[in-house]
């Protein structure tokens, strides 16, 4: 197990040790994955994180990468949804990586919502869990909260139909508990909760209670509807106690388990077992303080070489320490690269 997971997610780290772990992981994939070896046949160990090899996110739509090695037990395949006329990304999951990724997401989420165990409401249907062989990214994101859940309630039968929200069940949970976790894909939360006509008895049940909404998945539909973050948060938190929160995190289907939360100062933070790098779209040189393509790196991916991915998202590294007190790289997420298809990472 990587020693980087033994410390809090946003503590300072030894950069040389991090690069050494990434080099060892890259060598593992070069040896165990023929498809990856064909991409990087002349690979040599890097001296800096920005010199590490990477795969473009688009390649996972066309090649199923799988690394063989001692202790690797491949399990299900994680799929993104596909846009019209395109193939979904497919990521092979393995037990070793999944265990590390679960530790990663739990550590980051505890930092954001606290360690308390409480009921979890998931804006999805339980039938999404019953698919064999493959698991949707949307469901994987919701289940990252399972270690913090005393019990789980799936409260939306059909994610395409906000009218299928089970408000009676939601009311029963809030009448029984004072502190509740709620997960939903960003757009689903907006259409099924924030803009919903919540029944009067449910509003009465949740009044003054504490709720932490956790969401992921992108803002494109909300931007098209001219909904900003302040409006989104306020609509979700209506009626709840003042210490309730909305936590927005960013992640990739290609790097499930490694999540980048938005802090109170408006920046995203890379946990200490990962790194965020920004590259000039034309030269691919790494840049700081300027807008470019975002590359995400982590030491947790053993069953397939998705440990270093050049995304189709635009970002900017913000130098210096964050006023929120978290160490490590902080960055801004600035949207999709121009002329790139919209990725449906949440399978909606």
Image: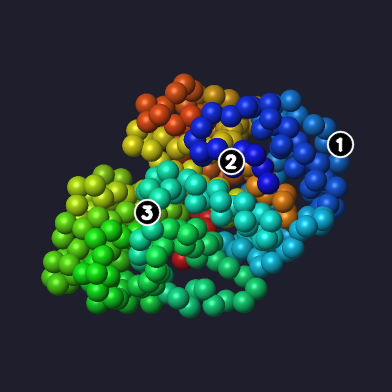
Q: Which residue is mark 2?
A: 6
Which residue does the image show at 40% across and 50% down from the upper left? Answer: 115
Q: Residues within 10 Å of mark 1 (few under 14, many from 20)?
A: few
Q: Which residue is mark 3?
A: 116
Q: What is the spatial separation of the Cα atoms under label 1 and label 2, in whole angstroms?
A: 33 Å
First of labels 1, 2 by sequence position: 2
83 or 32: nearer the viewer: 32
Q: Is residue 78 above or below residue 50?
A: below
Can residue 297 be seen here? The reply is no
Q: Which residue is mark 1?
A: 42
Q: Is residue 167 above or below residue 193?
A: below
Q: Is residue 341 above or below residue 122?
A: above
User: Given this view, does label 1 or label 2 mark the residue nearer the observer?
Assistant: 2
Which residue does the image show at 26% across and 50% down from the upper left? Answer: 244
Q: Residues within 10 Å of mark 3 (few under 14, many from 20)?
A: few
304 or 89: nearer the viewer: 304
Which residue does the image show at 41% across and 35% down from the upper left? Answer: 267
Using residue 19 as the reference point, say whether residue 156 is left or right of it: left
| Residue farthest to the top, as pictured | 320
Using residue 186 as the reference point, say whether residue 146 is left or right of it: right
* Res 164 quadrant in image: bottom left
Mark 1 falls on what kind of element? loop
* Res 111 quadrant in image: top left
Q: What is the spatial separation of the Cα atoms under label 3 and label 2, in whole angstroms?
A: 20 Å
First of labels 1, 3 by sequence position: 1
Mark 3 falls on what kind of element? loop
First of labels 3, 2 by sequence position: 2
Q: Are marks 1 and 3 in contact (CB under 8 Å)?
A: no
Mark 2 falls on what kind of element? helix
Which residue does the image show at 85% across and 47% down from the upper left? Answer: 31
Using residue 290 as the reference point, say whether residue 32 is left or right of it: right
């Amino acid at each position: 197990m990587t020693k980087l997971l033994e410390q809090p997610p946003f503590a300072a780290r030894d950069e040389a040790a991090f690069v050494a772990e990434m080099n060892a992981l890259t060598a593992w994939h070069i040896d165990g994955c023929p498809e990856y070896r064909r991409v990087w046949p002349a690979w040599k160990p890097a001296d800096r994180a920005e010199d590490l090899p990477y795969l473009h996110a688009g390649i996972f739509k066309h090649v199923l990468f799988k690394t063989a090695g001692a202790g690797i037990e491949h399990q299900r395949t994680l799929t993104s949804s596909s846009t019209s006329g395109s193939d979904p990304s497919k990521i092979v999951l393995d037990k070793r990586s999944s265990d590390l990724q679960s530790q990663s997401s739990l550590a980051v989420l505890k930092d954001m919502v606290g360690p308390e165990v409480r009921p979890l409401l998931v804006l999805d249907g339980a039938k999404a869990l019953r698919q064999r062989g493959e698991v949707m990214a949307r469901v994987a994101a919701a289940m990252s909260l399972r270690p913090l859940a005393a019990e789980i309630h799936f409260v939306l039968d059909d994610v395409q139909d906000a009218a299928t929200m089970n408000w009676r069940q939601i009311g029963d949970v809030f009448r029984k508990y004072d502190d509740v976790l709620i997960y939903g894909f960003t757009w689903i939360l907006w259409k099924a909760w924030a803009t919903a006509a919540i029944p009067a008895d449910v509003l009465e049940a949740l009044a003054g209670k504490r709720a932490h909404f956790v969401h992921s998945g992108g803002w494109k539909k909300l931007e098209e509807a001219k909904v900003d973050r302040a409006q989104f948060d306020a609509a979700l938190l209506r009626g709840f106690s003042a210490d309730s929160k909305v936590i927005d995190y960013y992640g990739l289907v290609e790097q499930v388990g490694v999540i980048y939360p938005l802090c109170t100062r408006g920046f995203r933070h890379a946990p200490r077992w990962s790194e965020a790098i920004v590259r000039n779209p034309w030269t691919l040189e790494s840049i700081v303080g300027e807008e470019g393509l975002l590359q995400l790196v982590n030491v947790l991916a053993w069953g397939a070489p998705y440990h270093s991915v050049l995304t189709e998202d635009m970002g900017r590294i913000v130098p210096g320490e964050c006023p929120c007190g978290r160490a490590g790289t902080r960055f801004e997420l600035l949207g999709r690269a121009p002329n790139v298809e919209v990725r449906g990472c949440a399978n909606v």
